[in-house]
Image (cartoon, rainbow, N blue to C red):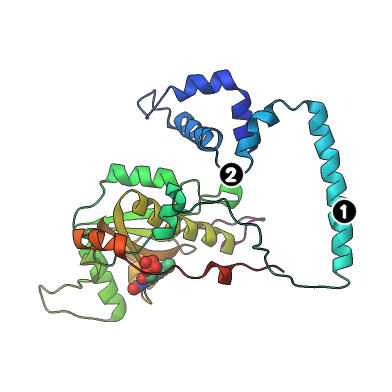
């Protein structure tokens, strides 16, 4: 947010940059992405603070200092209050009396989040590898403590799916007749295997790095959904068996987190979607106070 607000202050710089579009400009994708982020927050009026950015720009260093002082006073008050609360603990639960101004139907990203579905039977058309690179680019901002990047995906297409079937058979002790094959990995033309690849770090335990890798998986599903592709995340008890790990060339410290079966959303499914009545789970069950 600090960087965004810094970007807002540099208005000359911003207006010059926002004339640029796409990645054909010196391949400067990072700059374009920054511009999009600025546009999202500054021009899109997103979030409660977006409306006040212009006013904030006019604030002097003096007022910033005042705000800091106020923050310190507030923190002291909260601290005093919490020490009182610890004497007489009460659990009040969330307060829903003030209605939300967030519209998950009107906002395209929130809408995509709330309508995402797994598609168990996808059609054969798939994103190409360049499409996949863009999808990965879009999810690479996944929350990642110390930016350790503890995840990667492996592309599995064509005959590599048969190799996966053979590895699963070997793990299960299944011996097939000549010409027969394990058809499970053939349920889509494209699979992406997600590998969690944690590193040793004093401050970031392995579980946090698995959380990041898992986040990359969920973002992948969302990004594909938003880009119009169908996907389903699958795993199983044999996922980290020796033959399967060997096929994916995993190091000992790595973990296979399953496969994303990817393809086109079938037309019949697309037609059913607008009238689908699958309810979302009640959000209250996921929210509480201490
Ligand atoms: C890590 C992980 C592994 C999964 N493995 C399987 C699986 O092997 N088979 C399966 O039917 N669903 C599996 N699922 C669940 C599906 O991907 C999907 O989430 C579920 O069918 C519910 O559908 P929805 O995503 O539309 O809510 C897995 C989900 C996750 C997150």
Q: Note whether ligand 1 is within 8 Å of mark 1.
A: no
Secondary structure, mark 1, is helix
Q: Is residue 18 magenta?
A: no
Quarter occupied by the N terminus: top right
Left or right: where does residue 282 sit relative to residue 27?
right
Residue, disc 2 = 47
Which quarter of the picture shows residue 32?
top left
Which quarter of the picture shows residue 7?
top right
Residue for point 57% across, 72% down: 285
Residue 57 visible in image:
yes
Quarter occupied by the C terminus: bottom right
Residue for point 32% across, 47% down: 132
164 shown above or below 156: below
Which residue is more in the foreground, 225 or 105?
105
Foreground label between 2 and 1? 2
Residue for point 12% across, 79% down: 177
Residue for point 22% across, 66% down: 187
State the image coordinates of residue 212 (x, y, percent, origin top left).
52, 57
Q: Which residues are magenta?
A: 198-206
Q: Is residue 200 magenta?
A: yes
Residue, disc 1 = 77
Residue 152 visible in image:
no
């Amino acid at each position: 947010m600090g960087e965004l607000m810094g970007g807002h202050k540099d208005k000359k710089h911003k207006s010059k940059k926002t004339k640029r579009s796409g990645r054909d400009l010196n391949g400067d994708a990072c700059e374009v992405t920054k511009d999009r982020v600025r546009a999202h927050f500054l021009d899109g009026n997103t979030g409660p603070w977006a409306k006040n950015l212009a006013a904030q720009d006019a604030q002097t260093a003096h007022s910033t200092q005042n705000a800091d002082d106020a923050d310190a006073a507030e923190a002291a008050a909260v601290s005093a209050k919490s020490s009182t609360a610890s004497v007489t603990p009460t659990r009040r639960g969330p307060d829903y009396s003030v209605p939300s101004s967030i519209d998950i139907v009107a906002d395209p990203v929130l809408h995509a989040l709330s309508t995402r579905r797994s598609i168990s039977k996808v059609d054969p058309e798939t994103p190409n590898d360049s499409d996949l690179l863009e999808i990965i680019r879009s999810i690479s901002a996944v929350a990642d403590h110390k930016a350790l990047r503890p995840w990667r995906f492996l592309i599995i297409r064509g005959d590599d799916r048969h190799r996966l079937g053979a590895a699963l058979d070997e793990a299960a002790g299944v011996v097939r007749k000549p010409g027969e094959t394990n058809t499970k990995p053939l349920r889509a033309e494209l699979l992406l295997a997600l590998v969690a690849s944690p590193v040793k770090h004093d401050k970031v335990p392995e579980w946090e790095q698995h959380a990041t890798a898992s986040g990359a998986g969920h973002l992948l599903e969302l990004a594909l959904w938003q880009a119009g592709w169908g996907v389903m995340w699958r795993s199983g008890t044999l996922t980290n068996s020796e033959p399967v790990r060997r096929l994916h060339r995993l190091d000992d410290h790595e973990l296979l987190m399953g496969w994303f079966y990817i393809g086109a959303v079938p037309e019949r499914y697309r037609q059913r979607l607008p009238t689908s009545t699958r309810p979302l789970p009640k959000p209250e069950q996921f929210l509480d106070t201490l």
